[in-house]
Image (spheres, rainbow, N blue to C red):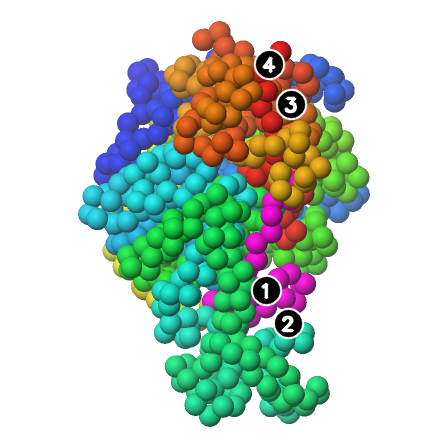
Amino acid sequence: MVDDRLTALRPDPDHPTGQALCVKGKAAPELVNHTDRLLHPVKRTTPKGSADPGWQRISWEEALDTVATRLRALADEAGAESVVFGSASPSTSAMSDSVDWLTRLRRAFGSPNLLVSMELCGWGRHLASLYTYGAPVPGGYMPDLENANCILYWGYNPSVARLAHATATTAALRRGARLIVIDPRRAGLATKAHHWLRVRPGTDAALALAMTHVMIANHWYDEAFVRRWTNAPLLVREDTGGLLRASEVFGGGGEEERQGDFVAWDTATARPIRYSTDEGRYEADEARLALTGTYEVVTAATGSVACRPVFDLLSQEAGRMPPEVAAELTGVPGEQIIEAARTIWESRPVAFYTWSGLEQQSNTTQTTRAIGVLYALTGSLDGPGGNVLFSSVPSNRIDGIEFLPAEQRAKAIGIDQRPLGPPRFEFITGSDFYTAALSGTARALVNFGSNLVMAHGDSARGRDALTALDFFVHVDMFTSPTADLADIVLPAASAFESEALRVGFETSQAAQSLVQLRTPLQPARGESKSDLQIIFALAVRLGLGEKFFNGSIEDAWRHQLEPSGITIEDLRANPKGIRLPLRTAYRKYETEGFRTPTRKIELYSVAFQEAGHPPVPIYAEPGISPRSRPDLAGRFPLVLTCAKSLWFCETQFRQLASVRKSAAEPPVEIHPDTAASRGINAGDWVHVSTPSGSVLARAKLNPNLDPSVVVGQHGWWQPCHELGLPGYPPYGPGSANLNLVLQQEPADPISGSSPLRASMCDVLPLE
């Protein structure tokens, strides 16, 4: 610090996540003190669609009063559900400090609609996994890297996404752990992996099913765990495809409470037996239950019915994907598939993590299911060295779940089309929001930092949707193509200028045991306020002050901390934080079971079957690929994916000279042979063309890529004046906005996830 001005940021090795600092963190002083910062509230003075918004400075009083008045009027006219609340992804922004409080505000206001790109970043690891485990695996059950013997990273590069995992993995490798990385690019820790599987983008489910087939065929699975803790033994009717209900075999009688019971086959007595969901127990020892075969079971209504155990169905589906078939689909040689499966089995316990590489595909949900089922075979869940739900500091829930009645939750945008998808959990997809805004169903947006038109596919449609809103207020540190469409923009203070409470840091038991009140490193610039201050101030203006501790953030934190016994004064006296002596409780499922319809890990998903989706994981070819669209393959023969940048944070930071100097222009990675066949040299400007148009990029040759795959990068729009580097228009000629030419459809049928990581293109020299 020099004269209350942040000048440098360094790692804190005493912090459980502080062993290293990423390049973006090192750029913090430049970010905080940048000349382009928004420092005052402003309002639009020209019509939407104008080249210049005509921003006019206003006071905070006017800004908050205007926002509250407009939102209340729209709620009275069209219902609170017509107002959508938005946030940048907490995974990649400072909204991790306040997203729960934003959720509280949304629910207190009465809206079931949160736009936070869940279908693109979070659905797989947090919500889709509920249909297998009844819990967020791996999003909540984090990899216990300190004790793992095998680490599996699938579509995840912690070197650019979560440095705490990268440093812990490096330490694990030093002590002898095995590492498997599945990624189209050999980037980050993939260079140190014992197995790097170069999968064709969008075919991850085929690879997972092939590995599952290998493990089952070789009996490389924890049979006792599978029998006891998955629904593998439950019988499936061959005529309907549904699980056989106990009431169909044994009669319901007066046992209404047991109508959810199921049936397994006892091989010792050659008869069906009941499985009680209430007790999570069978009427026979699990070791006697059939996992394979076909059995005739007599039912009261339909007579004799042929049934097979769930495990047999899974074996059959995985058997459609032997290594030689998967190799042709995925590009991963069959022997590599077998050896990776062998390592998973022989090097247990296994810890794994996935990221958005798997969440931006047209088959995201089934891919998540396939990987979750594969992991279940290892028996590593919630044991030392597996994926563990670490013990948490006791605290009060703050997200306001009690404020939103069921009838309002049922009004979430898109829930009719995606009843099992994000709207079920009050998250709406970008595509569904655009449709609702264009149709007039969504009337307003309160958006904290999310640069929607650059972060989602079909940027031009996003622009049109935001323009169609009656009212749009945006909170940010800088203007952006999204902010330029707002009616009011409020200046956000950075995380380095804001006080914030963090209860637990996720990545390990030591991290989860820490409570810290972050101290501002410099005063907030201009009139900027923290996201949390804006949320509380807006809550008071909306008449929701009672639900927000009358606007007192400190009182809110006291309430949050109360069960822990830690006070705000304690934390201020200990700026490095306070650690509670928590210990990890392993294998909690032994007493709690799983929060699924069968109370078991669901190799067969009851919810999927009832909704008409395949109940065991399947592979489907990406919806837009050279294989699925042969009519387009002649013009767009290459597979297009994208990847996170080491230097930038999604659509941010390209205005910062310290990082932009290392990545001056929008890249597209291409194999040297593919480039040569098109007359492209390293550093050439090229067109990346898709069925939706073309954008500019600089060719970067990468011999580790499959020759049929190219890798782009989204988020390019900001200029860097200090280096004399240009910005790029978000739309139209001269754009380098990859998402301008990537569509939101064909989407995953369950989650609505867009195929941003698995599409088709060609790369041609700029004429």
Magenta stretch secondary structure, dominant: loop
Give the amino acid at mark 1: Pro
Q: Is the residue 47 above or below the residue 628 in the image?
A: above
Q: Position of residue 206 (x, y in %)?
A: 52, 52
Indicate which disc, 1 or 4, sits on the residue closer to the N terminus.
1
Residue bearing mark 1: 615
Give the amino acid at mark 2: Gly
Q: What element carries label 1?
A: loop
Local crowd size for mark 3, using a 10 Å CA cut-off: few (<14), some (14–19), many (≥20): many
Q: Nearer the viewer, residue 319 or 602?
A: 319
Residue bearing mark 4: 766
Give the amino acid at mark 4: Leu
Indicate which disc, 3 or 1, sits on the residue closer to the N terminus.
1
Q: How far apart are marks 3 and 1 (CA)?
A: 39 Å
Mark 2 touches mark 3? (CB < 8 Å):
no
- Count how many numbered circles sit on residues in the image: 4
Indicate which disc, 2 or 3, sits on the residue closer to the N terminus.
2
Q: In which quarter of the image is the N terminus?
A: top left
The residue shown at (72%, 54%) is 416
Q: Is residue 620 magenta?
A: yes
Mark 2 touches mark 1? (CB < 8 Å):
yes
The residue shown at (46%, 38%) is 184
Of discs 1 and 4, which sits in the foreground?
A: 4
| Magenta highlight range | 595-624
Residue bearing mark 2: 241
Residue bearing mark 3: 694
Indicate which disc, 4 or 2, sits on the residue closer to the N terminus.
2
Mark 1 touches mark 4? (CB < 8 Å):
no
Q: Is the residue 512 above or below the residue 687 in the image?
A: below
Q: What element carries label 2?
A: loop
